[in-house]
Amino acid sequence: MLLSLAACSRSEVFRHEAFVFGTRVDVAVYGKDQAEADAAAAAVLREFDRLHRAYHAWEPSELTALNAAIARGEAAEVSDELAALLKDAQHIAAVGDELFDPALGALVALWGFHTDTFVPTRPDPDKLQALLAARPRMADLVIEGNRVESRNPAVQIDLGGYAKGYALDRAAAILREKGVANALINIGGNVMALGRKGDQPWRVGIQHPREPAPIATLPLYDGEAVGTSGDYQRFFELDGERYAHLLDPRTGQPARGTQSLTILITAQPNAGTLSDGPSKPAYLAGDQWREHTRRFGIEHVLRITEDGSVEVTRALRARLQFVGSVAPKLID
């Protein structure tokens, strides 16, 4: 009986999976009590579902209601949460020279990415040029308390490149409220760690953009988050060419020059949010990626170029364990 009781008291990883935000999510709780782990993870998944429904970019939601009001040239009253999200996304867009701009929802729709089962097609050239000429930007939004309006009716908000990071921060807050000290939250490759996995830190892999395996692994410590922007998750191929969902607002075309770019955010407030939005301008900047990560104070970065070359900052190289024979170029 003593041996049996000892076995029951061992800590283990309790995993909980779902499909939200158009991707697979995984909440892994390390502990001894499965009932407590299940309850905490269930609360997180309910929150993910709430966020998904509230801020969906094309199904009826608070966000689509705001977009409809903007298209009509009207102001809208939004929730405290959405007002705060829009202000933060506006700031991230400004710091990143508007390379990543959630106001470009109409551009995303033109490329057919506002559907779960898109058909490979290029956008109508005239509609694309008209939208580029309209130049919708987050800077067009006027946010006063809960009142939101736009100086530009072409603005259509899509928080798809931002919401997963915010959801990581919400998940971490809920788990801590539920007394969970050790967990790993994964939302389609955006990952945040709480505590440890026993006597070891959590270890995560960085996906190789062209192979079904990680290119490297790294330990993730309490409160840290990692996020990747890449051309290998939402994309289609047409006439032998790859078209990814990360669109360059300067050209209206899918960004070129980078297969994937990963950033590690050390423990700090809103680490989850910072692991998502700020990776986009660096990805879209191509060879100027380092300038953009510096703007956000991000020192841990790995980039895989269009030709498959690997570039990594010295700070992140010290944390990485590469898989196979990789000879990265070190960047200060």
Image (cartoon, rainbow, N blue to C red):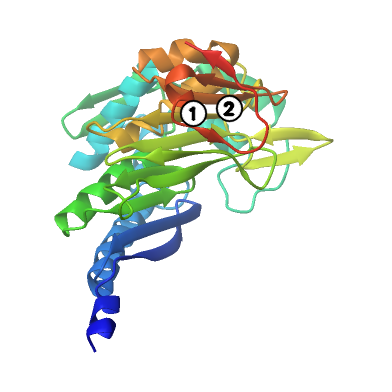
| Residue drawn at 70 percent across, 41 percent down | 236
Residue 315 or 125: which is nearer the viewer?
Answer: 315
The three-letter code of the residue at mark 1 reads: Leu
Residue 29 or 82: which is nearer the viewer?
Answer: 29
- The image quadrant of residue 27 is bottom left
Residue 198 placement (x, y as % from top left) = 31, 55
| Residue drawn at 34 percent across, 17 percent down | 297
Q: Which mark is residue 247?
A: 2
Residue 72 placement (x, y as % from top left) = 39, 33
**Residue 78 makes an appearance in the image:** no
The three-letter code of the residue at mark 2 reads: Leu
For marks 2 and 1, give the CA distance. Answer: 9 Å
Above or below — where is 26 with respect to 280?
below
Residue 193 placement (x, y as % from top left) = 33, 45
Which element is circle 1 on? Answer: loop
Q: Earlier in the sequence, mark 2 or mark 1?
A: 1
Which element is circle 2 on? Answer: loop
Tell me if 82 is positioned left or right of 235 in this view.
left
| Residue drawn at 21 percent across, 57 percent down | 180
Residue 174 or 200: which is nearer the viewer?
Answer: 200
Other-residue count near label 2 (Cα within 10 Å), few / some / many at <14 / 14–19 / ≥20:
many
- The image quadrant of residue 286 is top right
- Residue extending furthest toward the right: 239
Rendered-image quadrant of the N terminus: bottom left
Tell me if 63 is positioned left or right of 241 in this view.
left
Q: Which mark is residue 200?
A: none
Other-residue count near label 1 (Cα within 10 Å), few / some / many at <14 / 14–19 / ≥20:
many
Residue 6 or 294: which is nearer the viewer?
Answer: 6
Question: In the rendered structure, are the residues bearing label 2 and label 1 in contact, judged by CB atoms less than 8 Å apart?
Answer: yes
Q: Which mark is residue 104?
A: 1
